[in-house]
Image: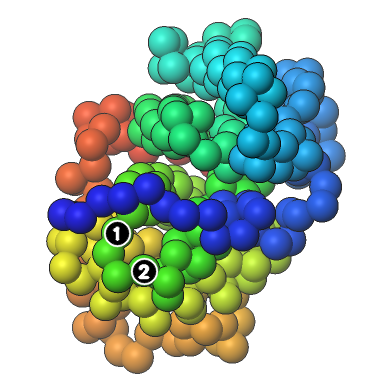
Amino acid sequence: MAVNKSPVIDKFGIIPPSYHGKHVKLNFQNLNGKESHKARPSFSITEEFILKFNQTQNSIEEEELLEIARKYILRCKRKLGLKTLGSGKHVHLPAAWTEVIYLAQCKGEIQDEALNMLYASLDHACFDYDHLPALFFVAESVLHRLCCDAFLKTYLYSVEIKLTKIGYLVFLRLFIFFLHGHLENFKQHLLRLQPYLYALSLSEESYYKYPNIFSNVLFILKTSEIICKRELPSESIFGLVENEERYEDIDSDMDMKLTTCSGTVLLLGLVFRITALS
């Protein structure tokens, strides 16, 4: 498989346009209005820092910015709880996922490390209803980047490969939340994903040569089709499923994909644990 570093598509290749020009302000409180038991952590990774990191041509300043970014990486690792499977008083997954997505804008080793950390966290973290706003932010960010790259390349880039794997885990989590009826209050979030999902569906052929990546893209599209069919009006870009046989085929695909997750044993345990949220 030909792999190369992804070029800079725009100033913020991963962050979707709806989040440009401001800090990400996710609601870390329960959507029912109850205060979260965890204090809101500070968030200090700015777009200004990312632009400066990527554009500086001063070697001394570059080393200083790299050192700052490495400190951000270490702080995110602690918030993610990578050594404790996402548990502990120091862990705050929604904030950490958001910061890691921002760090993934910093080209080079910081981007690679940030995406690796995000993938590891999503593969083993617990399920919590309060994670949903951050999950939708990650989902929109991943789809935005995939759609930007899909029409500008002739082969896959290393960053894009990682993003499809992260996208698979994010949509797997969203699908499980959907199965337990926890997406009713997230229709606006689903609507914001629609243009990206439509663009991704048009670029399927770009991934056909790479079966493992292609299966991740298909999983994202098929889970989205099921979720949007149930949660959104029929005017959704996916529309109504044409017949029950096709719906059964999709369900079969989902069952097969669930059993091949890299964290299969842990995930199966989490599926049962999530019932406590009901």
* Position of the C terminus by quadrant: top right
The span from disc 1 to disc 2 (Cα, nearest Å) is: 7 Å
* Amino acid type for the residue under numbered disc 1: Leu
Q: Who is closer to the viewer here, 57 or 199?
A: 57
* Left-right relation of 92 to 158: right
* Residue 121 on image: x %, y %: 44, 28
* Position of the N terminus by quadrant: bottom left
| Vertical placement of residue 117 versus 209, above or below | above
Quadrant in the rendering for residue 219: bottom left
Could you tell me which residue is drawn at 76 percent across and 27 percent down?
43
Mark number displayed over residue 156: 1
Mark number displayed over residue 153: 2
Visible residue check, residue 146: yes
Q: How is the image coloured?
A: rainbow
| Vertical placement of residue 209 versus 124, above or below | below
* Left-right relation of 269 to 167: left
* Residue 54 on image: x %, y %: 62, 40
Residue neighbourhood size for the residue with mark 1, other residues' Cα within 10 Å, grouped as few (<14), some (14–19), many (≥20): many
Q: Who is closer to the viewer here, 127 or 261?
A: 261
Q: Are the two marked residues, 1 and 2, in contact with CB atoms closer than 8 angstroms? A: yes
Could you tell me which residue is drawn at 45 percent across and 29 percent down?
109
* Left-right relation of 192 to 70: right
Could you tell me which residue is drawn at 29 percent across and 28 percent down?
266
Could you tell me which residue is drawn at 27 percent across and 64 percent down?
155
